[in-house]
Amino acid sequence: MRLSVIGCGYVGLVTGACLAEAGHDVICTDIDGERIAQLQAGGIPIYERHLDQVLAAGRGAKRLSFTPDAGEAIRGGDVIFICVGTPPKESGEADLSAIDHVARQIAREARSPKLVIEKSTVPARTGVELRRALTAYSRNSAIQFRVASNPEFLREGTAVLDFFHPDRVVVGVEEEISAAELREIYRPILERKFNCPVHEGKCPPGAEGAFLVTTINSAELIKHASNSFLALKISYANVIADICEKIGADVEEVTQAMGLDPRIGTQFLKAGLGFGGFCFPKDIQAFIHLSESVGVNFDILKAAERVNKQRIDRILEKVHKALWVMKGKHVAVLGLAFKANTDDIRFAPALEVVRRLLEEGAKVHGSDPEAMPRAKAVFPQVSYHADPYEALQDADAALVCTEWDVFRQIDWERAGKQMARKLVIDGRNLYSPRRMRELGFEYHCFGRME
Ligand code: UDX
């Protein structure tokens, strides 16, 4: 099928490249001309595992192309995926101006019927407005627009893998034919009818993910409800961790046992510095805003958000208690990305920690396998070290903010000899408290007996 993708961020690029790999002809565009020029020249503007491989295959097979001309992209596809940003406004409400802009562009530039799909995360009822904008701005009433919602459930860092091995593909539609078209688009993936380039042990060939057809409102809600639930789970684990600290229990033991109940599950119960990234914080805010706009109380989600913000205070309390005076102290911050395996620093807890450390006069030395260039643009005053041992040289404290494997594997015996003081404050519970104690470290973590 001929598909267009508008917006070449994390979601759009992965969607476009993976759909090309699955056998479709895909044309992608973005309002950022530099980004398109980079993609046309064979570059990749973001770090996402396997994306290089899938992009190269799509380009090689001539099924994937990029254009700075939105009109060309719109006319080049029968189905258009809208993958533009929906950032939070000051009030927490999702800013839908990019969706509105694209809707008007589609209405103006289309010369044939289109199935227009919201893939960006949007609040419920956006589909109604999208349809209205498409109709209102169309210059040719003979051109039919159908609207659908197809929310993404892609985790940064494993987005390509998630796209090829979905637990579920949700399509919110108004007409049966839209569901049929979307089923056709996803058929190679759902039925594993193509040579999938990435497996990593997930989804044995032949396994089908669920294909769920819903209303557009439900599909939009499914995305917000899913992410908010996961955020609730993390905040819940974090409160349990605080209780464990007070009464002398171990949060890992507690959550592991809780998770063995299949109704609870073990995932997303890791206590620590809390969640960040461009999805959870903004999706929660948008969902709270939506619930308030329809008069439904969502205090439970507000509490999850509050708990998450307080994680930063909690780690800084630990830092203050251990370091006493912050001014002039050399603090090695291990991890700047909002989670491992990404270069994304948007709403990263690590950045807020760095900001507060700098405010208090600490000398921050940061290390991250992928996120340093982005962090440098925000905090040029931080010293950056590709090698974590360099960041730890003469450090008064090490603060672990992101759960990268390279930090998990640090040889603390070696690092301890380099540090000015053997102090580790672990925001991701990566190390064994006993082992750290044996190595002579003062070690603080979250909800575990130290
Ligand atoms: C999320 C959803 O998982 C995905 O389905 C959706 O489409 C987009 O939003 P992502 O933003 O990439 O994906 O992050 P995710 O892997 O879900 O992690 C979110 C944050 O929660 C990270 O900061 C992570 O460190 C934190 N986290 C996760 C915890 O603090 N504890 C946990 O147990 C799990």
Image (cartoon, helix red, strand yellow):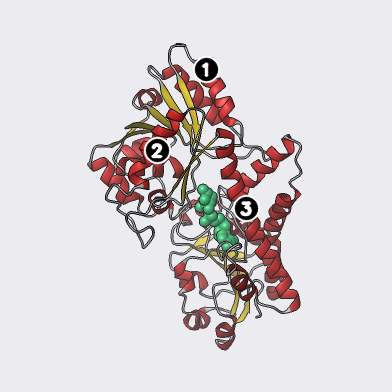
Residue 65: % across, % down: 30, 35
Pointer 3: what residue? 229
Question: First in sequence: mark 3 or mark 2?
Answer: 2
Q: Is 54 placed left or right of 60 in the picture?
A: right
* Mark 3 → mark 1, Cα distance in angstroms: 35 Å
Pointer 2: what residue? 183
The image's mark for residue 135 is 1
Position of the N terminus by quadrant: top left
Residue mark closest to the camera, 3 vs 2: 2
Residue 433: % across, % down: 59, 81
Residue drawn at 62 percent across, 66 percent down: 272
Pick out the residue farthest to the bottom. Answer: 438
* Mark 3 → mark 2, Cα distance in angstroms: 27 Å
Tell whether label 1 touches label 2 (CB within 8 Å): no
Tell me which corner region of the image, top left, top right, bottom left or bottom right, holds residue 181. top left
| Residue 31 makes an appearance in the image | no
Label 3 SS: helix
